[in-house]
Image (tube, rainbow, N blue to C red):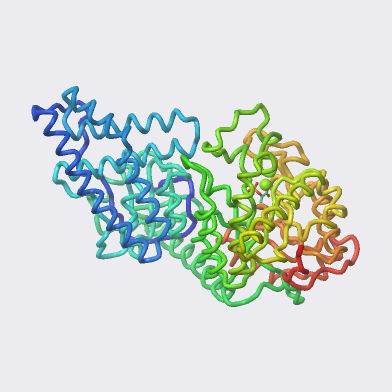
Amino acid sequence: MRIRGTRVCAGMGLAKVLVVESPFEVNLEERETLPAGERREKLSFHLALLEAEMTALSAQLFEKGGHDESEMLMMHLAMLQDDDFKESVCSFIEEGYSLAASIMRGAKEMGQLLIDSGDAYMAERAGDAEDIAFRLICHVKGAAFPSLACLAEPVIIAADDIGASLLMGADYEQIRGIVLSRGSKTAHISILAASLEIPMLINCGDLSVLYDQVRGNPDDCMFLNAVDGWASFRIPEEEREEAAKIKAAYEAEQAAREKYKAVEARTKDGRRIYVNGNIVETQAIDNILKYGGDGVGLFRTEFMFMNKKNLPSEDEQYAAYYTAAKKLNGRPLVIRTMDIGADKPVEALHLEPEENPFLGYRAIRICLGNQALFKTQLRAILRASVFGNVRILVPMISSMHELDQTIAALESAKADLDHEGIGYDKKIPLGIMIEIPSTAILADDFIKKADFFSIGSNDLTQYTLAVDRMNEKVQYLYNSLDPAVLRLIGNAINAAARAGKHCSLCGEMAAEAGSLPALIGMGLVSISVNPASILPLKRLIESLDYGELRKQYGEATLPIPASQTLPAGRG
Ligand code: PEP
Ligand code: MG
């Protein structure tokens, strides 16, 4: 049988299937005669046991380098420690429900609140609440929580849906793939699988026929093609050969990419192209280094502010920037100040809803309107700058006045640190995103004051063509290769080149095989992409001839900076 699904993480696997099912259903109507007081005591007892177990598991994960997984586990645990959750469970107990039913009812109630928040990310956490509640119920019932910790052989996991906590502490090496009948790309289980590079498909539909077939034929293998979005079980002879060929070709392609880990990206005719990685948290730097990336070209720091009750303190932010700078060991680290607003809401700021959020109060506009918030971040970045090659990048600059105000805010943060005797890189470069047409048009003026440019082609396309980048209905109009967008990109590249300053591009088009040749022909020497694209792009770059592309796309031969080394920034 063949199933189809949505790809969460590309890759292929060929292995036996392990169907993961809940050991029991929680009956939400179950009642219990045990006095409520005793059930409450039992709840506290099992909560304490689970806390101890999960804290130990989290520490183990942290030691093994799974910092994100460890933090995620603690986030799940925090849901159970929430006073509102405990109160709601107790009120169900008072109503006479059994302890197990009360816990699941409490988790569902919490989940509903998250769904009602109207925030897609928070809504995904509803599943996490039930996942962790189920773990607690297993404790209460003395049942074993399904575990993937000891797997005797490689397996592909098939399930209706699984919680992230099941994968944490699993024997990752033996997991060759995951297929889920439900799921979502932004659920923690998906984020985790992608970061562990486990091939995964979601939304595969009803898998009960597959489960029956697996029970009847436990030794048969599944071929999972999570590159093209399908999986086959009990493959007919003729398809088996085809599957083996596809897998072999894919593996050969993967192996061919391996050599690019150790080489710098150069075109056929020797032009050096710097391939950096985009990150939202510091652990992804490990992958950038693994793939031989040149540095971090875009640290989207706003993710540190999202989905939190409180804003991160200066020290918390400093810890992240310090970790990133240390990991990169002298390679460039471009930290973008918070690009908050529109599709990246920050609840802790309690901002008013707006009619046109993409054109509204967001990013640098919020920072300049809330100097204390901005200064906290600038101080944290400055303090970390002594530990590496740190650069500051500012999003959404649309007017010269904003750049002047940004420079003033940075100077003020520096003066405070000077006053306090705290060290920082006195020549830290300050760059701006070129993502608004007004700034791209006046690039020659902006580059006089900015130390470098980073072209945000995602927003530049949206704002130039008046096409909402999030709206499926108008996606057919969203084209980063539109001549108008290319003209603005060329304007920025040329302006930076004329000034002898650095220009990179960090939007999605940098990772597209159809766009990169044009960008390189236009003179771009530096890109920043998601870490998984680094190797394929190095390979692509090697096949390109800069001389030829220059003839095709370059308007004039301009002096292009020969390296990623920046001229001295502002002192
Ligand atoms: C961009 O707009 O191209 C960009 C890189 O920033 P973001 O996608 O975070 O808006
Ligand atoms: Mg942007």
Residue 475: tell me if it is visible. Answer: no
Q: Quadrant of residue 498?
A: bottom right
Q: Quadrant of the C terminus?
A: bottom right
Q: Quadrant of residue 12?
A: bottom left
Query: Which percent across, then down, holds residue 362?
Result: 66, 39
Query: Which percent across, then down, holds residue 555?
Result: 89, 60
**Which sits in the foreground, 187 or 57?**
57
**Which sits in the foreground, 9 or 65?**
65
Residue at 70 percent of width and 51 percent of height? 394
Query: Which percent across, then down, holds residue 121?
Result: 48, 39
Residue at 59 percent of width and 50 percent of height? 376
Total labels drawn: 0
| Relative height, residue 160 to residue 169 (above, below) | above
Residue at 70 percent of width and 63 percent of height? 428
**Which sits in the foreground, 529 or 329?**
329
Residue found at the very far right of the displayed protein: 556
**Which sits in the foreground, 373 or 161?**
373
Q: Is residue 363 left or right of residue 21?
A: right
| Relative height, residue 275 to residue 341 (above, below) | below
Query: Which percent across, then down, holds residue 454?
Result: 72, 56
Q: Is residue 491 left or right of residue 391?
A: right
| Relative height, residue 535 to residue 491 (above, below) | below
Residue found at the very far top of the displayed protein: 95
Q: Quadrant of residue 500?
A: bottom right
Q: Is residue 456 left or right of residue 79?
A: right
Residue 282: tell me if it is visible. Answer: yes
